[in-house]
Amino acid sequence: MIKKSKRIENLPPYLFARIDQLKEEAIKRGIDIISLGIGDPDQPTPMPVVQKLCEEALNPANHRYSSYEGMLEFRKAVADWYKYRFNVDLDPKKEVLTLIGSKEGLVHIIWGLVDKEDIVLCPDPGYPVYKIATLLAEGIPYPIPLKKENKFLPKWEDIPSDIAKKSKVMFLNYPSNPTGAVIDKHGLEEAVSFARENDIVILYDNAYSEITFDGFVAPSILEIKGAKDIALEFGSLSKTFNMTGWRIGYAVGNSDLISILSTVKTNVDSGVFQAIQYAGIEALYNLRDFPKESSKIYQNRRDMVLDAFKDLGVEILPPKGTFYVWVPVPEGFTSTDFAAFLLEEIGVLVVPGIGYGDYGEGYIRISTTVEENKLKEALRRIKEFFGKGDWKSKKPSLLLK
Ligand code: PLP
């Protein structure tokens, strides 16, 4: 009998893996599913990026191990992007590291910073990986509550001062998965001063920096004075250039933090396929306006969702970024029951808010990474079903635990 480590045994099930399972179960039962679950762009990677990959894949020089920290050309391309986009200066040799997608870096940096029982502040609701990375390193995740009355932004006085003093690391993520909220420079200044006062490292997840709406331009935390002393920012080509399957991202910022992450990575992976890094360089220099076009698509879809719920009398804080809409569930339902209910009654798959932390209860997350006609059909089903009065007496039977 194989025995798992306690570390693995104590992990909550990875939410999206469970959702995939449920989807399969529902399909087997003959339900016609529209998935508004996982956030994975439906649009293709831009063709020049694909072409670059194909060219570089043919070159045998790229078939060998690449360097651990990433090709200098790729790290330079990231530094140039930061100068162009945020007016932030970065030394590509010491302040930029190539990642196999930002998720990889977000997990591995914790191994380099967190010892048993160290406290890590995690946004709640937040991307589940922050908490799981902490648990894998035997640290203690402590929630940063993100509440609607604060526009889903942190109120630093919510963190008890003894906890703040003992915390070693904090994750912060704007534009936010799952709420779609954004933060301005003033909010980031407050975060930096809270972290500096309490000697906390900030891991700033800016994976959605380029997907923003209504004219909002997302800042980098490295624009804030003093941030580079304590912060590492994570970015990704996944959402910016529709490259989720390619696995390429970067960490930028404090050189000691870069060096710590690099030490972990040197011992667990052997770099990103060079052809992918060349394709990434192509994207970072030559497709700089591409995410603006994607944002227009997502803004239009966001508006479709907002309009549909408005017609049902549901008030939603319009997200200013990401491709998620954070929708309150009707009274009398848990987020889990409601998500299960949508799946089995009308075949619409969404993610229950509780999967993003205790403060996520009372919400579901809708992802708009589906083509418009499917989104339209999902919204039509939602409106038709909830437009009728008798749905409240029904109870879901699918278990979404
Ligand atoms: N950060 C956030 C907030 C995310 O939602 C995701 C993916 O959904 C990631 C990071 C990871 O992205 P990737 O590993 O593809 O760069």
Image: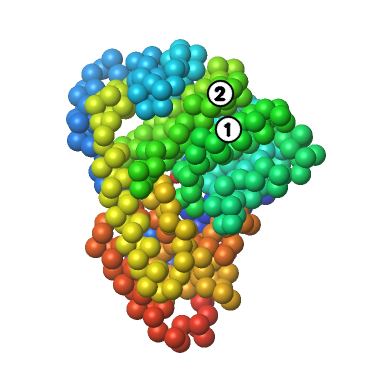
* Rendered residue at 56%/23% (across/down): 225
Residue topped by disc 1: 189
| Residue located farthest toward the right when viewing the structure as drawn | 162
Q: Quadrant of the C terminus?
A: bottom right
Left or right: where 12 falls relative to 293: right
Q: What residue type is labelled 2?
A: Lys
Task: Choose between 215 and 136: the one closer to the eye.
Answer: 215
Tell me the quarter of the picture where residue 271 sits: top left
Q: Distance between the residues labelled 2 and 1?
A: 8 Å
Q: In which quarter of the image is residue 227?
A: top right
- Crowd rating for badge 2 (residues with CA inside 10 Å; few <14, some 14–19, many 20+): few
Q: Can residue 9 be seen in this view?
A: no
In x, y percent, where is residue 167?
72, 35
Disc 2, SS: loop
Q: Where is residue 261 drawn, in percent x and y?
A: 56, 23
Q: In this view, does 186 lie to the left or right of 61?
A: right
Q: Position of residue 398 (x, y in %)?
A: 50, 72
Splitting the image into four quadrants, where does ligand 1 fall?
top left
Q: Earlier in the sequence, mark 2 or mark 1?
A: 1
Q: In this view, does 116 lie above or below 401?
A: above
| Residue at left offset 42%, top offset 40% | 208
Question: Which residue is denoted by mark 2 in the rendering?
Answer: 225
Vertical relation: 100 (above or below) 333? above
Q: What element carries label 1?
A: helix
